[in-house]
Structures are given as C-alpha cells and as structure tokens.
Image (tube, helix red, strand yellow):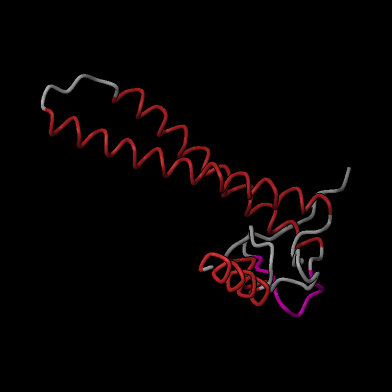
Amino acid sequence: MKAETFLPNDYTPAEDEPFMNDRQVEYFRRKLLAWKAELVDETERTIEGLQGAARNIPDITDRASEETDRALELRTRDRQRKLISKIDAALRRIEEGEYGYCEKTGDPISLKRLDARPIATMTVEAQEKHERREKVHRDE
C-alpha cells in the first residue's frame, strides 16, 4: 500500500513542478472524491424528498406542476449518476497511473483544464477535434 502524500490545504498544482507528481495526483484524487461525495449526498436528499412528496394532490394543476418538478429532478439525478461513473473512471485512471494524459494522443492534459474539469480525458485540442468529427457525422 502506498504511503499517504502530505498535501497542504492551500496546495494548487503548478506548471513548474513535474507533471502528475505525487502531490498533483493526490490533489486531483481528493478533488474527485469530494465531488463524488457531494453528488451522492444530493442524490440521497433527492430520494428522501421524492419519498416524502409522494402524496395525493387534488388540484390537477398543482399535481401536474409537482410531477414536472419531480421529472426534472430525476433527469438531473440521472445526469449526476452518469457524472459519478465518470468520476469513478477518473479515480481508476489515477490508480492505474494514466490520469492526466490524453486518451487519444498520450499528451499531458493541462493542469488548468484538469482543475476545471477533473474528469477530462482529452487535451483541449483533441477534444475539439473529436467534437468537430462528431458534428460532421451527426450532420450526415
């Protein structure tokens, strides 16, 4: 088992240190775990809220409004469920030593991009190329 890496509370990855050194990897691992915990908490609150909201509302307009709100909440939670699976995939990449590198080119993903979107799997350039290709195929 790997020894825990010391990470100051105010640590921010910097471009002038070796890419994906132990501190950077630990920083992103903690960031991903905190994000996942937040999403799981929100999901649990939603489930509790939906269970508590299951009631018979006599007014048809009020009932329709509540059902619309519930449907929107469920769609949001479904997106979060998919996001949690992407977070889990990023955590697996950390364990495998592949985190922070583009899955298409193998180049390092910029620290700014990873900080903004820690589940990123491609560099900005590779992502843009991928999206352009996707748009072309969609338009056909």
Q: Examine the rendered structure and indicate whether residue 103 appears above or below residue 15.
A: above
- Residue at the image point whose x is 15% and y is 32% from the top: 62
- Residue at the image point whose x is 64% and y is 49% from the top: 87
Q: Examine the rendered structure and indicate whether residue 99 appears above or below residue 105.
A: above
Q: How many marks?
A: 0
Magenta segment main secondary structure: loop
Span highlighted in magenta in the image: 11-19
Question: Is residue 14 on the magenta stretch?
Answer: yes
- Residue at the image point whose x is 86% and y is 48% from the top: 3
**Identity of the residue furthest to the top in this view:** 56
Residue toward you, 82 or 134: 134
Task: Point out the image quarter for the C terminus.
Answer: bottom right
Question: Is residue 60 on the magenta stretch?
Answer: no
The image quadrant of residue 118 is bottom right
**Identity of the residue furthest to the front in this view:** 140
Question: How far from the left and from the top, in percent, is residue 139?
Answer: 51, 68
Residue toward you, 99 or 122: 122
The image quadrant of residue 88 is top right
The image quadrant of residue 114 is bottom right
User: Quick check: 59 left or right of 93?
Assistant: left
**Identity of the residue furthest to the left in this view:** 59
User: Quick check: 14 left or right of 140?
Assistant: right
Question: How far from the left and from the top, in percent, is residue 101?
Answer: 77, 66
- Residue at the image point whose x is 41% and y is 42% from the top: 75
Question: How far from the left and from the top, in percent, is residue 102?
Answer: 74, 67
User: Quick check: 124 left or right of 108?
Assistant: left
